[in-house]
Image (cartoon, rainbow, N blue to C red):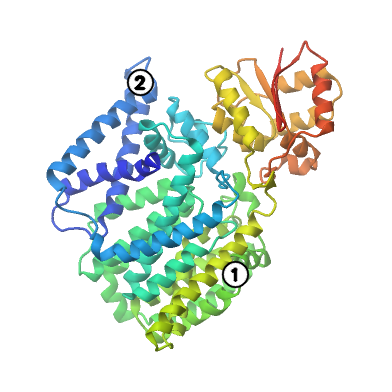
Amino acid sequence: MISALLFYLIPYLLGRSIIRIIHKRHRLFCPAVSYFVAGSLFIFLIALIERYFLLSVVPGMSFLELFKPTLTILLALAVVINILLFWKAPDLNISKHFWPLLLCILLSGITFIIWVQHSPYPLNWDFLEHQTLVNNILAGRFSYFTSQITDTFIFDGYSSLFHTLLASSQMFISADIIGFWQSISFLHLIMVVFASYILAFTISDNKGIAALSAIISASIFETVAFTAVFFIPQTFVAVIFIILFSQLLMEIKHDKVLPFWLVLISLIFLILSHYIVGFVAAVIYFGMYMFIRYGEWLKSKVDFTALIEISILGSIFLILFSSLISSGFLNQGEGQYFNFTLTDKLSFIQEAYGYSLYILLPLGTFYTLKRKKLPEIIMLIICLMLVVIIFLQVSYVLKFLVLGRYFINFIMALGLYFLISKVSNRFLNRMTYIYIAAVFIGIFIINSIYWKGNLYYHNLQTQIAPNELVAANFLQKNYQNTNILMISDPATQNILETFSKINSQGGAYMILNTRQKLIEVAESSNTTEIKDKIFQIKDSIASDSGKRLWILSGRYFNWQKASKDNREALYFNVWAPSDLDFNSQKYIQFLLSDSQHFKLVYQNNTLAIVEVLP
């Protein structure tokens, strides 16, 4: 947990020192997010300068040997500055925010306990590739481009900013990988719920609406966006965006405007964190900033009610004809497999929200138009804009639910509040909130059970087997810091590379050539030919040592049983663990009969590790 807290604390302390020294004209509202953003960019800038400039004049040093002492010195200075200069100026009035914080932590705790039931390991599959990249940074390999650090990334969808922050937090306290990701996922969930509360309260000035928004946010699990419980770049950038967006609104409520340089660094941070989701977030953020600057003129010129009506008609037209839009720039990497039909998207959203969306979203829209409050109308416009984007017949766009959910949940909360406000009895009114929380948590329980339904393994609901972690520990003890290439199916590679720190060819995203070689291996009955095929697999980044470790797991054999098209596709994986069966054991014995080329070095019920000899 301490290492996970450092992910937020290190950039915060650095950013707080920088901004409080530079910016003295007025106190910021919700300053912590600006401190975090500024500190994050400062850390990333230091890393880039050292990687691309200083290392060229300091031969023989690795990136980490230069970066760690630099960050240590800067952090020590930041702690001293914060203690000496700013310790009397807290960023958050705890007494004022105690009950909202308690509500958000309580909701997050309930949701998280439900989520981890029978699941001792993180169910966020993507954390494996992100941790693999962090492992490479901590081993001294760093680049702005994620695909140049590890071939687990075949497409640069974002800079390595996110991973630099992760590496910085793990650099000072050696963290258990499982514990770190469970802890930071919980902290992320708290931030998601609190961001929903802050956004709703800032817009409506109503604690009831804010509480309802927090309840909905904590309880809705989207099966594609994974917003609430998955800590990944797209969800990370979304929650920071919502807090930055709320900060803009707080400033204008107090007749102040953020300095442009703070707006600029926020825009840079959003885009660097995720090029696609972050760019859309940056457009909305900058659009709101410009509206704040020129809002008075727009209010006198624009009929916002008419604008919403025109937007709805235009949105329907755009959704119907969006299939004609070219989206080749999105059809890269895994994103090309997320071009869902309108029916699929409606199904995903209904799974997440149940029928509440169909009732509360229209009701919230009606209530917004009835109240005619400009901030709420603007939120409705943004909500409709993002809903339109999500329903376009274009690949990847369903991922924008990570942004849209906050605005959707707010409009739904307005609809719910409209109903609850009809209950005049104070006691019954409060009980209604508890009842609504129970209903939405019930929806979350149903979604959790449904989503984890195919992950049963030895009385667990998991994507990682205990025996795989034991095998990873064996690999780390016996093969770490050796120039060796590990080969298996994508899922086994993804898990073992993360926990053993042994290089594989592409992890979960092995290239097509590797997939085809493994398909050819499965079709061969000649051990010499199999050996030759294994050695034809090359890593696209690391140098080739001529040594190979072949991991023959239950997953590997299940993967080989899939169709050729699935084995060649990036989207297909063997998500649940599987033990070795009789036929698998028989195949392993067949390989070991050729002792000249195959040597068993480790085996348990789940997998066998075989050295392939030249």
Q: Which of marks 1 and 2 is nearer the N terminus?
A: 2
What residue is rendered at 34% in x and 61% in y?
A: 101
Check the picture and name the quadrant holding the N terminus.
top left
- The answer to which quarter of the image holds residue 494 is top right
Residue 84 or 508: which is nearer the viewer?
Answer: 84
Q: Residue at x 36, y 48 (%)?
A: 269
Q: Quadrant of residue 534?
A: top right
- CA separation, marks 1 and 2? 51 Å
Q: Where is residue 455 in the image (x, y as percent from the top left)?
A: 67, 49
What's the amino acid at mark 1? Ile
Left of 199 or right of it: where is 336? right
Q: Disc number at residue 56?
A: 2
Q: What residue type is labelled 2?
A: Ser
Q: How far across and down, in percent of the image, does residue 298 sit?
A: 31, 75
Looking at the image, residue 606 lies above or below residue 261: above
Q: On residue 189, which mark appears?
A: none
Residue pointed to by mark 1: 319
> Residue visible at 48% across and 68% down?
216
